[in-house]
Amino acid sequence: MTEEKTRRHPDKCYECSNPMDLFEIDLQKAKKVMFCRGCGLFHYYKKDFLGNWKLRKVSKTPEISYDEQP
């Protein structure tokens, strides 16, 4: 009954749990790109209509003109 949910910190990598740095943010399009120091992956986030950041994509290369495909 008293199960603890394991929540990941938003500034930690999903692969290796290392800290991430902000690489790029676009407030008009509500998108941000975070870079993991440990594994070198780029994490792409988009804001949902409630204002929470949702992970959309993880890639090895940075895509500056990232357009989300549904």
Image (spheres, rainbow, N blue to C red):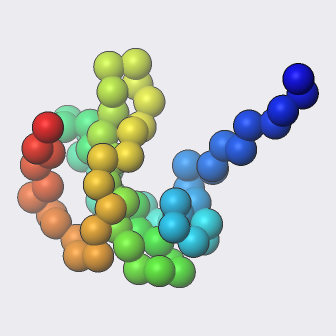
Q: Position of residue 28 (x, y in %)?
A: 20, 35
63 sits to left or right of 57: left
Q: Is residue 10 above or below residue 48?
A: below
Q: Position of residue 63 (x, y in %)?
A: 16, 66
Q: Residue at x 38, y 73 (%)?
A: 41
Q: Is residue 45 above or below residue 17?
A: above
* Residue 23 shows up from this direction: no
Tally the marks: 0
Q: Residue at x 41, y 69 (%)?
A: 35
Q: Which quarter of the rendered picture does the N terminus lie within? A: top right
Q: Residue furthest right?
A: 2
Q: Position of residue 66 (x, y in %)?
A: 14, 55
Q: Is residue 10 above or below residue 60?
A: above
* Residue 58 shows up from this direction: yes
Q: Position of residue 37 (x, y in %)?
A: 50, 78
Based on the displayed image, in which of its 4 quarters is residue 18 positioned?
bottom right
62 sits to left or right of 11: left
Q: Is residue 70 above or below residue 48?
A: below
Q: Which quarter of the rendered picture does the C terminus lie within? A: top left
Based on the displayed image, in which of its 4 quarters is residue 52 positioned?
top left
Q: Residue at x 81, y 36 (%)?
A: 4
> Nearest the camera: 14 or 10?
14
